[in-house]
Image (tube, rainbow, N blue to C red):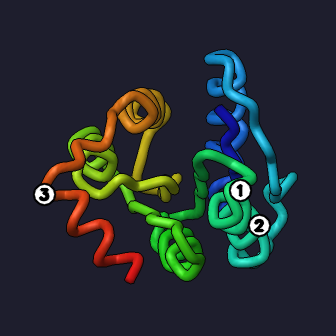
Amino acid sequence: MKISIASDHAGYKYKQIIIKYLIEKGFVIIDHGTFSSDSVDYPDFIKLAAKDVSEHTSDLGIGVCGSGIGVSIVANKFKDVRAALVVDEEMAELSRRHNNANFLALGERLLNEKNIYKILDIWLNTEFEGGRHERRVKKIED
């Protein structure tokens, strides 16, 4: 599975941690930056990862900024991207099970490293439930 990832300066530290973790799990990673903790504008980087998901170059996307809010706003502007801002394990599960989220928005200032691993594991291993949720997800795409 291929995952595109991006961050701004406020999410750079966790982006690096996430990349290492996902590579160890066998995922192929496309890193769209940023590549340091120097101040940058998050849309410049998040757009690249969201575009990959929209164009099916990547199976999933992950974006990290300070709060995750900017990531989710930018990513959701792209066709076929369903970005979910996740701050806990339950949100990780529900975003996949009920909303078929394909882009994970994380806020470095709101999480700790222990939470990141749990959220990633749940988000990556939860299947879309379909059923009544399929109808609702289709309405998003209309």
Front-most of residues 134 and 18: 134
Q: Position of residue 13 (x, y in %)?
A: 68, 44
Q: Mark 1 is on which residue type?
A: Ala
Residue at image coords 79%, 45%: 30
Residue placed under numbered mark 3 in the picture:
132
**Mark closer to the chain start, 1 or 3:** 1
| Position of 24 relative to 40 (above/below) | above
Q: Mark 2 is on which residue type?
A: Leu
Circle 1: element type: strand
Quick check: 135 left or right of 81? Answer: left
Residue at image coords 49%, 70%: 72
Residue placed under numbered mark 1 in the picture:
6
Residue placed under numbered mark 2 in the picture:
48
| Position of 122 relative to 97 (above/below) | above
Quick check: 139 left or right of 112? Answer: left
Position of the C terminus, as image quadrant, is bottom left
Q: Is the residue under label 1 in contact with that under label 2 (CB below 8 Å)? A: yes
Front-most of residues 80 and 93: 80
Q: Position of residue 54 (x, y in %)?
A: 64, 66
